[in-house]
Image (spheres, rainbow, N blue to C red):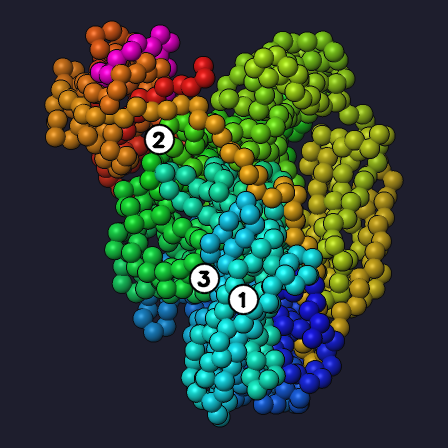
Amino acid sequence: MKLHKNLTLYVALWGALSYSGLEARETYNFNPGWLLSVGDAKEADKIAFDDSSWQKITLPHAFNEDDAFKIGIAQMTDTIAWYRKHFKVPTSAKGKKVFLEFEGVRQGADFYLNGHYLGLHENGVMAVGFDITPYVKFGKENVLAVRTDNNWRYKERSTGSGIQWNDRNFNANYGGIPKCTWIHFSDPVYQTLPLFSNLGTTGTYVYATNIKVKSRTANIHAESEVKNESEKSVTATYLVDVYDNDNKCIASFEGSPVNIASGATVTLSASAPVSGLHFWSWGYGYLYKVKTALKIGGRRTDDVTTVTGFRKTRFGEGKVWINDRVLQMKGYAQRSSNEWPGVGISVAPWVSDFSNALAVESNANFVRWMHVSPWRQDVESCDRVGLMQMLPAGDSEKDVTGRRWEMRKEVMRDAMIYFRNNPSVIFWECGNESISRDHMLEMRNIRDQYDPYGGRAIGSREMLDIREAEYGGEMLYVNKSEHSPMIQTEYCRDEGLRKYWDNWSYPYHQHGDGPLYKGKDATAYNQNQDMLAVEFVRRWYDFWRERPGTGRRVNSGGAKIIFSDTQTHGRSAENYRLSGVVDPMRIPKDGFYAHQVMWDAWVDPERPAAHIIGHWNYPKGTVKPMYVVSSCDSVELRVNGKSYGVGRQEYRFLHTFDSIPYVPGKVEALGYSADGQSQITASIETVGAPKTLKLTKYTAPDGVHADGSDIVLLQVEVVDENGRRHPLANDTVTFIVDGPMEWRGGVAQGKDNFALSKSIPVECGINRVMLRSLPKAGIVSITVSAPGFKSQQISFETLPVEEKDGLSSYTQRTVLPSRLNRGETPLIPSYADSKVDVKVASATAGINGETVSASFDDNELSEWRNDGRLSTGWITYKLERRAAIDDICIKLTGWRQRSYPLEIYAGEKMVWSGSTDRSLGYVHLNVETPVLSDTYTIRLKGSATDSDAFGQIIEVAEPKAGELDLFKAKDGDKVNNELRIVEIEFLETLNK
């Protein structure tokens, strides 16, 4: 049998819908030909029910998709909706097993086939499957009915327990069946599907051991749970073929014959060493197709193809390795809905690639999905584009007990089984908040049972002192460790519309203007693009400063909250969250390019880069600050060749020029190395008067398919006579669509966010809209017009898609290519040590000597503190060796808002005096004239002062007493002469 290129998970054969033979496993797209009715229709589960007036749709399709970005998350429609489908199973399939797979429903759903009740699914997150063999009619019409209920207050029927993650803050409620569906045909002796929910089966597991990156070798293992539902025992041999990205078979091997009794379930396996491998990596989505089959009675049967990749991981010493190279994690905490205007979650697969590849283009190396598992389409997309994933199951904001904890374990189990073959999944997340040690062990046991060889760390947010967690890290603040890696899970909550450039540009939105949030100043949530990008640099600096190579205890990076603006809880003047580096249509803000510069490295910057924040079209007489984000050591600014000198370097990557007069022309930023060598030039120019509209169409690589679910993104720009986008254009453009496409629109600031409107403004000279194909092929023409501009037209043809009896052989996922842009993992080290730390051997303190070791114990939930008297506010540290310490790195309780006046002595000599900075975790006290000593004393010289340096960082989580950041700590504002030290390190800088 011929193996087709780019097969997706579980697909054994995608041919024409002739159903001839049905000798092997076949999987078909089950999305076409559904009917939808919103409301609780009585007896809609019955075969004879009249559904002739129902809306015709193609899945995936949320029944409330019109809500997307129109209203706030809490107002999303939550009601009953019914879905029905009429389909036929070919007569030739008689004697086969028939399974249905739903990638997800929201929130609870009842399933009926031909009037028979199939079952209930209630977690609203994971996939569910049904064996419909006993109820299906072969060669005749079947009627499938699904009753969905996406009530925000949905409760589990058997227990009355609420669903913890069905939450109005973060889990956008796209209801009904917003994900894909499949139908599978197999022989009675078959490899099971990875659908534990309802079916209770675990499917196929493919993994690698003994990976040797440099020599490109590994042992490849495959195992499948196999059921014998025939009437007699059989002897089966497990066959494995491995195909590379070019569809070349690079290895074939098999297991020993196994007798499987009738009604029995066994696990078959095989393994072999394989050479010449390409290892999956960041920005290098190299995938293999591992084809497993059964040989029974000399006949090959039940071919299943698993798309996977192989990579080597390691977690320890506070660091993360992939393919033997240390990687500081840089990425985004994205809502798992990953939604779009007009359609919500239900986009075509190429659109998922478009979005996730854009994150990689910003030089993100991972995405931390928030609270609940993403859908399979996004997981597979991350495989293709080379974006690592931190994957949760289901959670809200805290640990729970009883039935709600059991639910979380069940969803984690289902997620592990469903996604354990996806190489981009690197971390399993057990909770969006810390969980108990016992709960951590329970989750680890689930991982060890279902994914023991996947090379994935399991942990949770926080988990700073529970060593059973294989990673941890707080939400907002910088943590360090010499043990498990610490990765911040959602730092920087600031928000800003893409529409607003700065204080000097149309539409003249002054930085921070907007309503109060819960009665408090909300400047941080109504930022201009300039200042939002600056804030992104400022926040990343605290992580970069503690990167691998800066001592024994390091930070392993973090996820900035939100990649794209999202229809979830926000704090700005708008009704959706604006923390993204791109807007909802994935148009970049300046913060996107700031990250692109800062994150272009595994650890240390690897190539010079620069980006000038903003534009260069201003009223005459404007004088404004200019900001350049650059990895160079210094940056010079020139306007029309005139130099304005070297900028003030702050936060390592930010170069500020305070007062630059506007003169039409060209601005250049010239980056230099530390020895003055020119490295790179970035530039922006004054754009001429708006002249014309420019249209750009984005589609899947193989064109637009008339399957009822494919998407076209149409971009409109206002450009000058040289084709350059005008940064201040805000013209309203109108679209007229002729042909078989459905208008789904875009988003802009205004009434209802212009949801579904066919007239919409460009913002900063650009906008995008979305159209969805209909199940009818034809020519589509789109005319775009705006007052003062000549109308523009774009035309294209939608391609016919074969569909028969409600089943289709076409799925876009099978033709999407892997993206290999960054190349394979480099074999050279990713960083050079810039600092070494000298360990503390012992310490004495002015008081509470029994807890003084808490100030250097690598546990950020412990601290030493004095009793509020100045005379007791000191610790003397005895180091393991004499050292000329020039950098004392210290985490002081209340790091974000408290400044401590300190003196530091090397032996008897004072080497530092001053007040500590406020930070997101650690401060560095730099000693200008180091003194060789093995004794260092930290002494409080006065009362600390409080003043929040990172104002408006507001948590959704419930307050709890005793937090060391003091934000929610009981009596945290009572200072006195108090010295409180969480962790301290004594560092020597190398190669000064």
- State how far apart marks 3 and 1 are (Cα): 11 Å
Along the line of sight, the residue nearer the viewer: 942 or 295: 295
Residues tagged 3 and 1 counted as in contact (Cβ below 8 A): no
Q: Is residue 632 left or right of residue 724?
A: left
The answer to whether residue 553 is visible is: yes
Quarter of the image for the C terminus: give it: top left
Dot label at residue 103: 1
Along the line of sight, the residue nearer the viewer: 26 or 726: 26
Instruction: Say which residue label 2 marks.
Output: 552
Numbered disc in front, either 3 or 1: 3
SS class, disc 2? loop
Residue at x 85% of width, y 48% of height:
793
- State how far apart marks 2 and 3 are (Cα): 35 Å
Q: Which residues are magenta?
A: 923-938
- The answer to which image quadrant residue 344 occupies is bottom right
- In the rendered picture of this protein, how many numbered marks are placed on residues? 3
Residue at x 63% of width, y 41% of height:
822
Q: Is residue 948 above or below residue 775?
A: above
Q: Is the stretch drawn in magenta largely helix, strand or loop?
A: strand
The amino acid on which the numbered mark 2 sits, given as a three-letter code, is: Arg
First reached walking from the N terminus: tag 3 or tag 1: 1
SS class, disc 1? loop
Q: Is residue 315 left or right of residue 23?
A: left
Question: Picture coordinates of residue 74 (x, y %)?
Answer: 47, 53
Question: Picture coordinates of residue 188 (x, y %)?
Answer: 53, 85
Dot label at residue 415: 3
Q: Is residue 458 magenta?
A: no
Question: Picture coordinates of residue 513 (x, y %)?
Answer: 53, 29
Numbered disc in front, either 2 or 1: 2
Callout 2: few (<14), some (14-19), or many (20+) C-alpha neighbours within 10 Å?
some
Question: Picture coordinates of residue 101 (x, y %)?
Answer: 54, 72
